[in-house]
Amino acid sequence: HIVLYHRIIAMYTSATSIRAMACPRQRSSMRGEESSMRAQVAPLHQPRLSRTPVVIRSSKKVQASAQPASKGASASSASSAPKSTPKISAEEARELYRDMFLGREFEEMCAQMYYRGKMFGFVHLYSGQEAVSTGVIKACLKKHDFVSSTYRDHVHAISKGVSSKKVMAELFGKKTGVCRGQGGSMHMFDKEHGLLGGYAFIGEGIPVGVGAAFTSAYTRRVLGEEDHDAVAVNFFGDGTCNVGQFYESLNMASLYKLPVIFVVENNKWAIGMSHARATSTSSLADSEPWIYKKGEAFGMPGVHVDGMDVLKVREVAMEAVARARRGDGPTLIECETYRFRGHSLADPDELRDPKEKEHYASRDPIPRMKEYMLKNGLATEAEIKEIEKDVVAEVEDAVEFADESPKPDMSQLLENVFADPKGFGIGPDGQYRYMQPGFTSGTAAVS
Amino acid sequence: GIGAAAANLRPVAEIQFADYIFPAMDQIVNEASKYRYRSGGIWDVGGLTIRAPWGAVGKGGHYHSSAPEAFLTHAAGLKVVIPSSPREAKGLLLASIADPNPVVFFEPKRLYRLAEELVPQEAYMIPLGKARIARPGEDVTIVAWGQSVLTAEQAADALEERGVRCEIIDLRTLTPLDVPSLAQSVKKTGRLIVVHEAPKTSGFGAEIVASITEACWADLKAEPVRVCAWDVPGVPYALEDHYLPTVNRILRGVASIL
């Protein structure tokens, strides 16, 4: 089964790219920045996995990210930033590390809890993709910015600032969860932190994020509130890039120069459908289905970044967010990343090549960041251990909190249908409908 | 699928969950159901069958648990078929594929793991548009489809002990509705209960109650009762068991009209 899949993949992608996973990578070096820079089309046999960020110039001047020459060729080399001057403060580095480690711990704990029957339904874990969430949300966004996510939303919620206790309680279906147990894993919402959800349909949240960006632009340009600079970030996967809503949103965002950022978490698999088999190329000169190139077709910069490196993601995201806040419009960021687990906890994950998994496991963003911090004197071993201990305690606290929380009352079933908070209004007997006999307020325990 | 069917193939399109049918609604309702009518019979999309897992199970949450059959029964030109067991499923699916009209075939998810039955190896078809009497009775007619048939059976077992004999009708095909079979049963019992998983307001139960009231007005001994899910916008994660029509609610419904 795996061999057959391997052959099929090889037919559609350049044959060497898969073999190249195990071989030392060659990096294309980036020249200059301000001079007009055409997108570098990958030569046919260049392994796709080693790309340094490529910026496509829009008509406005986009500050290209300065890329240092590569150092080691081995796949597990720690950092790609110059050794001499780290571009990040010790405090921020530690925050980013903590955020990634928290994301990982949380997701692994979710797996444990699921198999112990504490959470149900469909749970989609984010393990492996933490660099994207941390690099975009934690590093660049403020509290009032909006995030619109997918069903793989636990870590987006946590990075945005939602308490891990509330997220865990929601997963357990408890009253103290973010949605009081109404939504579950795929429906995380938070008003305070601007989390617009958790969507089970792919591409469903993209128009919503664009709408939030519209509000921000409208408030600023039409209502005249100059310092209103909220941006909206849409997260979605490679499969979503074949959904109509995505293209409609790209067009509108570009047309109105909305402060929205489209972040594609390209983990190469849409459940069991390989990206290479599902998506066509974006330009006649290409042989690979690049997603970032779709940005230019819609009039916005498209960037490809190594999604397993939090510092690179952060750099690209900072630029995109600054661009959006200035009022220059949207950006499309394609993050090459990988999920270590299956699509969901119900997925046996038999379709993916073990070599592919190994390759990406060796590029795990968390050990990478740890090495970077140690090498550049941003943190000591002891401090890192302290952080990790703290995170483990936080996740355990979250589980305890969720466990001890009560289940939702039955009366919650009929609340929030309409604006009237007590359910859908008054019944024919003059009472609130949820007060009808036989619908007593009790716990939601199954009898 | 629609274009392929118009050009004479016989495609079977899968939509992974019935909830996901909404992005396809435009094409299904505006194209698939209308093609034959709009073109005066020149083209049709009869070869198309859409199958989708349907219904709530295992706390799947808002977008993995819906029963959206009511939206599709409103589109004339489409047939909507929902089996209630493995043997039914095979026969009805083969009949749906062979049927010269576009058919939407919903497969109850709860039955994937729950139901075990001996299914004949050879191909066989169960005719569309004909309801099945799952259990004969004299006191009250319960009409259900999909996994609600199982719930109705459980309720009927409980009622049997109290001396009430329910006639359970498994609708199988929602549109076109088999009014004669239902009318025959209600004329006998005089009491109608419809059980379905979708919310009550404008659910397909409303259509059944209206049609039967028109057909059997003089024979009804009590008002028709619908036991359905509550009128809320989605299937809540933690409260799924309270959202769905339960055996207790069916029992209360029967009690109210006996």
Image (spheres, rainbow, N blue to C red):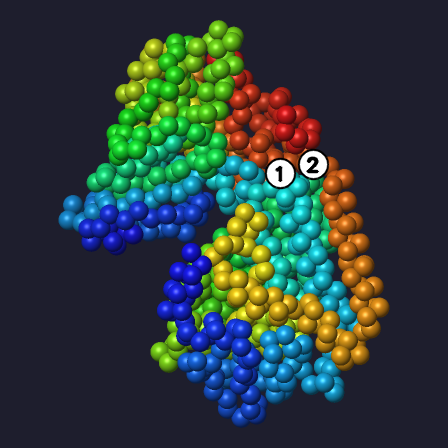
Task: Report in which chain the residue with disc 1 lies.
Answer: B
Residue at far top of view: B163
Residue A403 sits in quarter: top right
Secondary structure of the residue carrying numbered label 2: loop
Q: Spatial distance from mark 1 to mark 2, Cα to Cα?
A: 8 Å
Q: Which residue is mark 2?
A: A407
Residue A412 position (above or below residue A85): above
Q: Position of residue A346 (x, y in %)?
A: 54, 47
Task: Report in which chain the residue with disc 2 lies.
Answer: A
- The answer to whether the residues at label 1 and label 2 have Cβ atoms under 8 Å apart is yes
For the residues tagged 1 and 2, is the chain the same? no
Residue B53 sits in quarter: top left
Q: Looking at the picture, tell me which residue is in the foreground, B7 or A194.
A: B7
Report the residue at 55% width, 88% height from top: A30
Report the residue at 47% width, 71% height from top: A18
Q: Looking at the picture, tell me which residue is in the foreground, B6 or A286.
A: A286
Q: Position of residue A399 (x, y in %)?
A: 74, 47
* Pointer 2 local density, CA inside 10 Å: few below 14, some 14–19, many at least 20: many
Report the residue at 37% width, 24% height from top: B170
Report the residue at 55% width, 83% height from top: A27
Type of the residue with mark 2: Lys
Q: Which mark is residue B222?
A: none
Q: Which mark is residue B238?
A: 1
Q: Position of residue A257 (x, y in %)?
A: 52, 73
